Image (cartoon, helix red, strand yellow):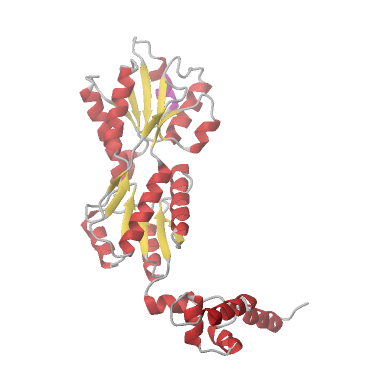
Amino acid sequence: VRTRNAVQKEVIFISCTIKELAKACGVSEGTVDRAVNNRSGIKESTKKRILEMAEQMDYRPNHLAKSLATGITKTLGIVSVDLSNNFFALLVESIEQTAREHGYFVNLALSHNDPEKEMEAIRYMAERRVDGIILFPLGKGAQFSSFLKKLNIPIVTIYNRIECDFVHVDVDCRLIMRNVVSYLAGKGYNEMIYIDPHFQNMKSRGINVFSIEQRRIGYLEGIDHEKLGESNILEDMDEKQLVDIAKRKDGKRKVFICRNDTPAVRLMTIFRKNNIKVPEDVGIIGFDNIAILDNMSPRLTSVDCNIKTTGRKATTNLIRMINGEKDIKDCVVDYNIVEGETL
């Protein structure tokens, strides 16, 4: 059994310092620094000898000291809403993968739909001197924008927009939903019910609802453009109400448009339970095209927002900002409708 002191000695031996490595090689610390960081001013034979000794002694550069000296930590902060929604989980995964490809690691914090927790998370990232932040904003307004600007850290927003002063990456949700209505009208649907759970509740709490509000606006514009009459928006997924609408015999072809895939999946479960056939009796379309849909039957028709592309674009734009590039523009990611079996 090893004692605590023995373990401590082992750790010290495994993680040798630059001073110990320099002594072992019989050179100065500056020469070691040039070798391990591939800088000029050192003979190739000396560099090779130092690198071989560094590997034997398992030398690891002191990144904390380096970051204090240079102001660069090679870390990015991600402040996301949560990971329970597969949409956000896939975005975070794409961001992390892209960051790693560019030599960055990520710090992740979740706001859990709480603006105060979001502020805490952003402060946490700033205190740890991340080089930049990718933010899924809950906050909004002039005061929130002023707080972010004072941090003097490059920030890219994703999903929700704050204001034009921050680079934003997302699909055009308003245009997409407007086009979805036209797409459904072209398939012969003439009654469209929009499922938008808890929208007013979130808005009344002062939460940033930019993305889902743009979807709602696009739906309303589409209904007007296609001259489909009164809009029908449901925020409470009451089972009886949904079933009554689906079973109503009025000669119209009904389709339920869901602002994302989660309520669409729930809707399919409700209809299956109540012997309402999809798509024979009613149609359903979702938004986000999350991966789990591939394992469902019938396969939900959904809008694919190219989540991985969004994550990559947000990350590369943030790194460009960190590297001092100016005039980086917002990025609108393309989309497509993945036709399943629910229309």
Residue 280 magenta-highlighted: no
Residue 232, image x, y percentages: 30, 25
Q: Residue at x 48, y 81 (%)?
A: 33
Residue 51, image x, y percentages: 57, 77
Q: Is residue 274 left or right of residue 318?
A: right
Residue 241 magenta-highlighted: yes
Residue 107, image x, y percentages: 45, 62
Q: Is 255 in front, or is 236?
A: 255
Q: Is 192 in front, or is 78?
A: 78
Q: Is residue 86 left or right of residue 130?
A: right
The C terminus: image quadrant? top left
Q: Is residue 317 visible?
A: yes
Q: Is 144 in front, or is 211?
A: 211
Q: Is residue 114 above or below residue 222?
A: below
Magenta portion: prevailing SS class: helix
Residue 16, image x, y percentages: 59, 81
Dividing the picture into quadrants, the one containing residue 12 is: bottom right
As drawn, the residue found furthest toward the right would be 1
Q: Residue at x 32, y 41 (%)?
A: 171
Tally the marks: 0
Q: Is 271 in front, or is 41?
A: 41
The segment highlighted magenta reads 239-244
Dividing the picture into quadrants, the one containing residue 19 is: bottom right
Q: Is residue 138 visible?
A: no
Dividing the picture into quadrants, the one containing residue 253 is: top left
Q: Is residue 40 left or right of residue 174?
A: right
The N terminus: image quadrant? bottom right
